[in-house]
Image (cartoon, grey):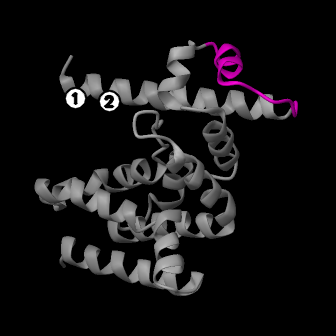
Amino acid sequence: MTNSSLNTGRSKQKQLTRQNILRTTQKLLEQQTPLTLEEVAQAAGISRATIYRYFSNIDVLYSEASLDLVTHSTASIFKDIEHLSVVDRILHIQSYFNKLALRNEMAFRTYLSIYLKESETAKSTRGSRRTAALKLAIQPYRHQIPKKDYQKLITVATALMGIEPFVVGKDVCGLTSEETEKHLNWGLKTILETVFKP
């Protein structure tokens, strides 16, 4: 077995564990009783140490579990775009995550605030649907992107979608939601025109 397939297997297992934790939390939240990470771990059938690798405290978990309910899976997003060109795929993913951020702006800001309050050593890993969706969308077109530019494209495209660039656009630059969305779309289109030259 190659290192690449081992890493892919581990990555998939981590995604499955994270989804198990989120689904378990969502079910437990329906009972409307306060929870601890230990109670979620027990209900999810994982160890206390495992849940702390994913979520450093119950507030981060509550917040992410709530947002997970309104966010499409990577597979669902890909199903909507598999017939599109690579540029249109990437722009569609950006549009989806930016509209999601705007529809749920306060919930995303709350999650970001809770997450950022954690110390660097206690910080849990965040979900990575934007990155996962981009990698899946670009995969058939990898040969069109120089190896040295692939990770840069994923990183920059991810940075131009979601709640974080809206915080910058609105709070730092003084733009409206609509203006921020247009600027982010312009930025990503400009980059894609450079990467995928006709």
If the image is split into quadrants, where does the N terminus sit? top left
Q: Is residue 152 above or below residue 115?
A: below
* Residue at image coords 58%, 14%: 46
Query: Of helix, strand and loop, which one carries label 2?
Result: helix
Q: Say whether residue 42 is magenta.
A: yes
* Residue at image coords 52%, 53%: 79
The amino acid type found where label 1 is placed reads Ser
Q: Quadrant of residue 187?
A: bottom left
Q: Quadrant of residue 186?
A: bottom left
* Residue 145, horizontal then vertical, whole percent: 17, 60
Query: Of helix, strand and loop, which one carries label 1?
Result: helix
* Residue 167, horizontal then vertical, whole percent: 52, 70
2 and 1 marks in contact (CB < 8 Å): yes
Residue under label 1 = 4
Q: Say whether residue 69 is magenta.
A: no
**Badge 1, how many Cα within 10 Å: few under 14, some, many 20+?**
few
Drawn side of residue 94 relative to residue 197, left or right: right
Callout count = 2
Residue under label 2 = 8
Drawn side of residue 157 relative to residue 26, left or right: left
Nearer to the camera, 136 or 186: 186
- What is the magenta range? 31-45
